[in-house]
Amino acid sequence: MNIKTMYQNCKREIDPLDPLRPLYQGTFEETVQVGNQQRRYLVYIPEGARPSTAGVFVLPENGKTADDLWKDSQWRMIADTDQAKEKLIVFFLEPENGQWNTQEPYGKPDGDVAYIQTVYAAGCERFKFCVHESKFYLTGCREGGVLANMAAMNQPALWAGVCSVGGSVVSDAYMSAASDDYCTNLDGFVDESHKKNIKKGQIGMPAWIIDDPEVSAGSDDGTADYWKRCCGITEGSCQTEPDTLTFVRTEPAPYEPNQERAAFRVCVSSIPGSSNDYANCLLPRIWKDFLYRQRRWMSGPGGDLRVTKDPVADLGMEYHCEEIGGWMREWYVYVPRQVKENPEHPAPLVFAMHGYTCSGEIYAGNSEWYKVADKYGFIVIHPTATPSTVNATNVACSPDNVPLPAWNFMHTAPNGPDELLFFRTLLEKTCASYAIDRTRVFATGHSHGSVMTQTLAMTMPDIFAAVAPCSGVLFSGFGMNIRELPEIAGRKEGEVPIWMFGGEREEWLLPPIPANDNDTGDSIRIWRSNNHMEPSMPENWEDGWTVHGRWHDLTYRREDGAPMVRYTCVEYMPHATMTEMSFRIWEEFFSKFSKADGKIVYCP
């Protein structure tokens, strides 16, 4: 079959009545430069793939090409028919001249592992699609399985899981070199000076080693043992399937609650014939039962492994998709059991907004506000933005990106949605369905969602009792100066307590330490002024700090002790959020405030 007829692709325009439909769909032939060689791969984007979906890298056995995988493996079928909204993007790789170099030395700059990592870097670009950084996975058959394990060992903080079928024997020399090497790419920031002193062998990796006795002499204990050591697994296995033993970490995961020990797992199987026909007989299990079941969220050094939970199927969230203001809008509502059991008792409400490129589904899993709601009894809404372009150039976005979910607070999307109408409608719809304590309505969000949070606070100070923007301040640049908007300039007066967060390792976006001449300091000045604190500019930026582990908190209180303006810098935090942050926001901030007759009430 001729390549010109074998692959087809199409580009669409944004449809307000189906805005999340992918603009590009089909198969795309791509190339990367590795040393002096140009190497190719294929990318398959299924119909219905959502922004920030999963990406699976598939490596064939020797003698097979990306074209063979595309034609004969069932990965496209899985991508097309996955029952959840997670219609994954598939990357079909291939060995150079038909042979993977399974004996290449560790760190070879122009070898097969470098090829895989270069394709990964290209897969992080957003010109046709967007794979979320928490959802990159590796799998391979026979010799491709060996390379999948080698690539995962080389950059463990980038992958959320690896599976090999009928080939996983990585050389002892390679494993030893990888294990002892410092990990400089720690998922969101680079640690070239080794300040964190983390080695690659210390980073957990969910792994499934599937032996095929028809093509190998015996089971491979070395690679499985390597991954068990990385996951901190010290105890025995349990039989999870007739053909599979599963080893799970029993000790608490590093830096809980942001990681879950259940995600630190290694599975071992021996299945005759499993590597035949590209492992097609096992692919549904490999994807849905193993790879999909964990994600590596960016936040702590090396990323945070947690078990994947679908908002509807696993958490029981309500899914809504309705037309509001001429656009189909999506949102998830989480109502914990204690609220359902006391339907007449008014419950607080938290709006939690995702960042650029993401969705309500992503932020539900990333922030885990549902866990906080379960403990303290309030309702959470996770809305999804509509696709647009962001007129900024930095490590997170580019004007050349395919349109991806972005809050339209700057009204840059042509004929785009009215976000203030959207949020007012969500509030009224939720109040019509549940008893809501309207004196205790809060907003929080990450990155682009943090600016949306502050837009809501400035335009609706009568509604929100407190807000907590994460990884975002009131920017003067990046095309996000909301202070220029007429609805901000002409807004109602009203105090809104605010707690802003920034990561030490996102200095490319915002200065981690406030000063008179940077955006972070200027944001504190503006919010002090909004909340009638004098003088608006602090006299000394060194005053008012407290340190709790990674957290460096700066707090400004009014006379009754109410923390009206807070800012926190988190050590070694990249452009991310985490579960612990959500708990802190509620326990130390939101739970202390209410708004009655336009006045902020503080109850320490």
Image: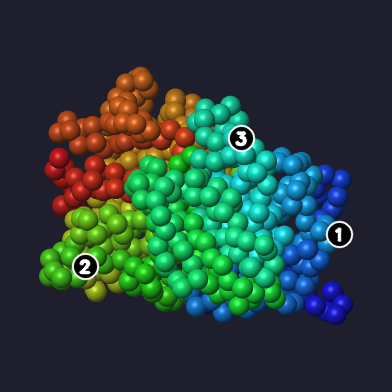
**At 29% from the left edge and 72% from the top edge, which residue is drawn?**
429
Q: Is residue 375 visible?
A: yes
Q: Secondary structure at mark 1?
A: helix
Identify the image quadrant of the N terminus.
bottom right
Residue 219, percent from left and from top = 60, 60
Tell me which amino acid carries mark 1: Asn
Identify the image quadrant of the C terminus.
top left
The residue nearer to you, when weighing 11 against 287, is 287
Task: Give whichever of discs 3 and 1 has the lower sequence position.
Answer: 1
Q: Which residue is mark 1?
A: 97
Q: Which residue is mark 2?
A: 337
Q: Secondary structure at mark 3?
A: loop
Q: Secondary structure at mark 2?
A: helix
Which label is found at residue 181?
3
Within 10 angstroms of label 3, few (less than 14), some, or many (20 or more) residues? some
Residue 367, percent from left and from top = 38, 53
Work out whether 588 lies above or below 182: below
Residue 373 occupies quadrant: bottom left
